[in-house]
Image (cartoon, rainbow, N blue to C red):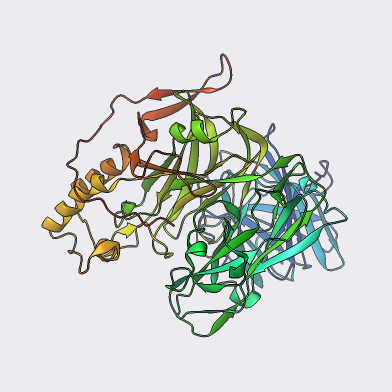
Amino acid sequence: MIHQFLPWTLIVLALALVSSGQSPIPQHEFHASLDEELKYLLDWSFDNTKQIMNFTVRVKTTGWVGFGISPYTGKMPGSDIVIGWVDSQGKAHLQDRFAESRSLPALDPIQDYTLLSGTESNGMTTLTFSRKFDTKDPKDLPLQTGTTRLIWAYNDQDPPSVYNIPIHQKMGSRSLNIFERQPEADKPALPSDVQTHDCRVPNATVPARKTTYWCVGMRLPQVTEPNHIIKIEPLIDRANAGLVHHMILYECDANDQWHDYSAECESENMPMELRYCRGGAIVAGWAIGGESITFPAHTGFSIGKKNDPKFTIIEMHYDNPNLTPGIVDNSGFRLYYTKQLRQYDIGVLTVGHLITLTMAIPERQSKWDITGYCPEYCTERALYKTGINIFGVFFHTHLAGIALSTRHFRAGKELPMLAENKHYDFNYQEAVYFRKTRKMYPGDSLALTCTYQTKDRNNMTVGGLETTDEMCFNYIFYYPRAPLSVCASYTRGDTLTPYFGKLMALGKMPPPKRNGSLGLLESLQHTTIGNQNLIDELRNLETYPAPSMYCAYSNKSIVTPGFDVKIPNFVPAVNFTYIPDTVTTGDATAVMSSFHVMLTLLYTTIIVALIL
């Protein structure tokens, strides 16, 4: 967030002030408001061939406008900023600046932004400008895929001079995905027969507790013939915008009598029929910062057929760090559906690392990787021979997550990266859309790596449900729908139990005060390793030994012959190096690294997995 634009005495620098009308004005594909009052609007488009990004800002002011790229913090220091305005003579100005601190950004000696036009009309200042994705200027930040943190500011007065910019009157920040986003033109118009169906929590009183998972059983639209759900819109109570962390709508084979049954998910009173549906096939998901999901014009989520879901359970994650009592919530989803059927049925595949106590992240780490696998053993048994077409993904971690990547393998070779977010923002979790679909065939495998940062934590972080615990998931949107619903892995209990025993013997980890997984969870959350050799040992244990796989169909029956089955012929993702094959097919090869460390461990008690 921008904190200050203060007047400052500047050494005169070479200044590029470009008047409007020198270049053709681009037609923009994407649009967003950077503020809640809709007074700062952003339009943009890009040219992948020329590696050029075009921006237009439309701001309700007759003064100066500031727009910047933050260094993945959402704050001003280190930001790449432009300041522009239209003067009393109608001439547009644009300055490329760089923020060293929370003060007036210094002029950049190299002006890498090009002003294309600037106008002021009806109290609105409009500036259109462009820049390269990567200017190679150390004072400019590169534009990359994944989350971009934008900062903005404006003042109702023009600067007294090009060197004296008065302090802002309004400022803020917003995270956006500026590359892998669905263009407005690609969102099909709603058909004339479209109907809506709301799946909302019925007046849930949120407990005065830091983390609550609330579940409600609900009917899907009661239709007697095939229909397609074509759009899913989040309905978040405005007063509870900071309370609702995420929502998931699961398919559920429960009896209709449980419609509107509402209680905490782990409550003893929660019917087993509803409890069993959590973690199954997903209809929709949303997390803070997300927007509506509009499916591509030739796809839809099928309802009304004999084997289609007729019931659902909505899982709400409430985050109430202030322990505020008496909050009532009615958030949920609105489903848009139509009888005008589309060509393909949509499926959602959950990939990642199961929520287990063996998902252990040491304290004080600037970068720690956890990888979950979707192994070929599962895809070759549960995907159709013709494969699936992936058109989007939705990444999800908690507070410590800073980056995610999903790698794609076929027949011992690594293909181009499926999806990546190098600058993940917990407060902006949005679906990523592909401009071209990616094909996944039976026998393919995926590796989702989640990167965490725990520099401000004194104790170990483990997999769990609270926002201070961690998750590592990628929800993959594809068509046509296949039987496979979950394709994931987890570090085995017999891999880490001896290590945890060593930490206890060394006094690094307190012994559990009670039996079961909750006792072990509490013990791990009070563990401080504090020794680099022990930290390196944990990294190796979580990286190289074969993990167990958990692969399930939409009804939660498992693909594997039993539970806790190791991935056969396992090779960790870190042992591959992606090399584009530009000579033949354009696919990629994967080269094994020079060493492959496989640890032989003593097997003891298996840690109970906390499977969501």
Tell me the quarter of the image containing the C terminus: bottom left
| Residue 577 higher or lower than 259, as above or below | above
Horizontal and vertical percent for residue 515?
22, 65
Q: Is residue 537 visible?
A: yes
Quarter placement of the N terminus: bottom right
Q: Is residue 5 visible?
A: no
Q: In this orientation, which residue lies closer to the viewer: 610 or 96?
A: 610
Which residue is outermost to the top?
583
- Most extreme residue toward the left is 505
Please tell me whether residue 262 is drawn above or below residue 452 in the rendered image: below
Residue 385 place in picture, x, y as percent: 59, 27
Q: Quadrant of residue 328?
A: bottom right
Near-viewer residue (456 or 185): 185
Q: Quadrant of residue 283?
A: bottom right
Q: Where residue 129 sits: x, y (%)? A: 73, 48
Left or right: 400, with 50 as reference point: left
Q: Nearer the viewer, residue 143 or 583?
A: 583
Question: Residue at the spot x=72%, y=71% of the render?
Answer: 37
